[in-house]
Image (cartoon, rainbow, N blue to C red):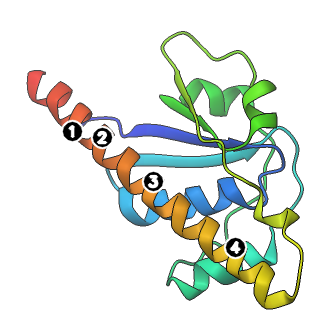
């Protein structure tokens, strides 16, 4: 049996962007990928992130806002940082673990009316969905090539 490729989405507080990325990656990537998200800190789950993902038919309400651990880093084949702070403060990664950075704006910093804020969250959700789909397609091609050589 082939071990699923493990992706860890890392953010500052694991409340919004990394949660959305985890939700989309699980939606599109299972069972080929093992998906986790974590934060440098834990800020709890953002209710607006949960709401916009529900609008898209993806339930992330059962995901946990967690602090990154050494075990998570050891298990990860790829760490995707989704904010500048997490990229700058990313722990040292184990040998063989790759990292890529997505410089995503934080929708939780949006201001205006509730509808204007929700529009920012929806735009962020849709951007992250496209990034996740592109990432998973790229990794699927790479892992299928590697697995066919085994």
Q: Are marks 1 and 2 in contact (CB under 8 Å)?
A: yes
Q: Secondary structure at mark 2?
A: helix
> Looking at this view, is 84 or 93 the one in front?
84
Image side of residue 73 versus residue 83, left or right = left
Q: CA distance from mark 3 to mark 2?
A: 10 Å
Q: Which mark is residue 138?
A: 2
Above-or-below relation of 56 to 69: below
Q: CA distance from mark 4 to mark 3?
A: 16 Å
Query: At 86% from the left edge and 62% from the top edge, which residue is drawn?
Result: 44
Q: Residue furthest left?
A: 148
Residue 97 lies, in percent from the top left, at 52, 20
| 10 Å crowding of disc 3: few (<14), some (14-19), many (20+) | many
Tell me the tag on residue 121: 4
Cα distance between the residues tagged 4 and 2: 26 Å
Q: Which residue is mark 3?
A: 132
Quarter holding the C terminus is top left
Secondary structure of the residue carrying tag 1 is helix
Cα distance in 3D space between marks 1 and 2: 5 Å
Bin the neighbour count of mark 1 within 10 Å (Cα to Cα): few under 14, some 14-19, many 20 and up.
Answer: few
Q: For this rendering, which residue is in front, 12 or 71?
A: 12
**How busy is the neighbourhood of tag 4: few (under 14 within 10 Å), some, or many (20 plus)?**
many
- The residue sitting at 76% across, 65% down in the picture is 107
- What residue would you read off at disc 1? 141
In x, y percent, where is residue 148? 10, 29
Mark 4 or mark 2, which has the lower sequence index?
4
Q: Earlier in the sequence, mark 3 or mark 1?
A: 3
Q: CA distance from mark 3 to mark 1?
A: 14 Å
Q: Nearer the viewer, mark 1 or mark 4?
A: 4
Q: Is disc 3 placed on a helix, strand or loop?
A: helix
| Placement of 98 over or under 140, stated as above or below | above
Residue 126 relative to residue 17: left or right: left
């Amino acid at each position: 049996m082939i071990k699923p490729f493990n992706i860890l989405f890392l953010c500052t507080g694991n409340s919004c962007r990394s949660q959305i990325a985890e939700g989309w990656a699980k939606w599109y990537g299972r069972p080929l990928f093992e998906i986790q998200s974590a934060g440098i800190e834990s800020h709890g789950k953002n209710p607006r992130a949960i709401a916009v993902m529900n609008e898209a038919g993806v339930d992330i309400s059962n995901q946990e806002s967690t602090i990154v651990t050494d075990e998570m880093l050891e298990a990860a084949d790829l760490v995707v940082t989704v904010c500048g702070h997490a990229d700058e403060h990313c722990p040292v990664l184990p040998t063989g673990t790759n990292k890529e950075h997505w410089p995503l704006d934080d929708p939780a910093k949006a201001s205006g009316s509730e509808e204007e804020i929700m529009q920012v969250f929806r735009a962020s959700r849709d951007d992250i969905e496209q990034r996740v789909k592109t990432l998973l397609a790229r990794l699927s091609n790479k892992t299928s090539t590697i697995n066919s050589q085994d």
